[in-house]
Image (cartoon, grey):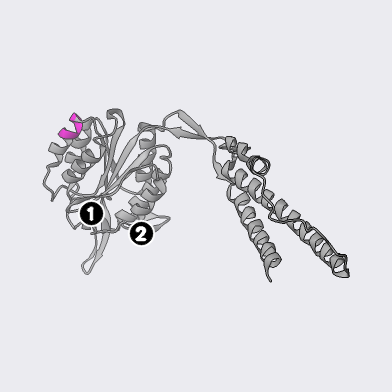
Amino acid sequence: MFELEWPWVLLFLPVPLLVYYLFPAQSDQQESALRVPFIDDFRFSQAVSLSSDRHSWLKILAALVWCLLVVAGSRPQWLGESVSINISGRDLMLAVDLSDSMRIGDFKIKNQEVNRLTATKYVASQFIEKRRGDRLGLILFGSQAYLQAPLTFDIKTINQLLQESAIGLAGERTAIGDAIGLSLKRLDSSPETSRVLILITDGANTAGEVAPLKAAQLAAERKLKIYTIGIGADEQIQTTWFGVRKINPSSQLDEKTLRAIADTTGGRYFRARDTEELEQIYQLLDELEPLGRDQQSLRPVNALFYWPLAFALVLSLFAYGASYRRWKP
């Protein structure tokens, strides 16, 4: 639908006419007392006629330019179809472990062996895309915890920053307590009913200044609900010079602490041994932290003022050229 944002600007359209009639231009020409007819007078009258026609066209161009400028000033715009947006009010912080153990290749995506971080990125990106209407933040932690992205509705940027993360970027060890503490700091200004942290790790707390259980107690006091996800296979076949043997690549995973963190804050602990389980966990998180049913409608607005403005500029240049030729000796 076409609409003028400032229609009152159209009241300025008759201003040039008011100026023309209220303040008429004074002529400096004086009539001669005596005129002698010669043949040159006929040529002169022809030139005056041509000049008068050109002057009329310049007036018309000036009027068109003024009308176009006034229309541009009224800010014409095109309103698109109404679009409904789901608003959930959730503030979700995603904390991802980038310690050295995340490079263990005990996951598969489409029958191709990948490391734990790649599997986390693959599944988490699908979860992030479903969080339209929520504010998401991203924390990357290893030996230290870093805020990669504050809370934002721009889930595309969150997903891109997650995909660009690399193992060892935050150090080789694991600071789970610091990641929780940083989440508390960033979610402190959010409503108490909407604070959620999803923490993904494959090990135990081996670094940092804050103990995980102490951080969990602080989180419970501040109404931060934490969902912990322990990733890593229970069994992996390893080929050595002495033959084939089975190993447990998740022997360093501290499930007891992760479960205690979730229980203390009213969340849940999940175990992801492969990509399928990780996908199921994120589907379950969608149910536990559902998108709100409230909707907010908006209509996209496309500004059109630059079209009459551009036409006014073109006509002004044309009028200037015509006027220049008129007065050029």
Quarter of the figure with residue 277:
top left
Q: Where is residue 184 in the image (x, y as percent from the top left)?
A: 21, 38
Instruction: Give the residues in magenta.
Output: 217-221
The residue indicated by pointer 2 is: 113
The residue that appears at 26% across and 37% down in the rendered structure is 187
The residue that appears at 21% across and 45% down in the rendered structure is 179
- Circle on res. 249: 1
Q: Position of residue 254 (x, y in %)?
A: 18, 44
**Secondary structure type for disc 2:** strand
Relative to 140, say whether 287 is above or below.
above
Relative to 296, say whether 234 is above or below.
below
**Residue closer to the observer: 320 or 263:** 320
Quarter of the figure with residue 289:
top left
| In the image, farthest residue toward the bottom | 329
Quarter of the figure with residue 29:
bottom right
In the figure, is residue 136 to the left or right of 220? right
The stretch drawn in magenta includes residue 219: yes
**Secondary structure type for disc 1:** loop
Q: Position of residue 131 (x, y in %)?
A: 40, 40
Label 2 sits on what residue type? Glu
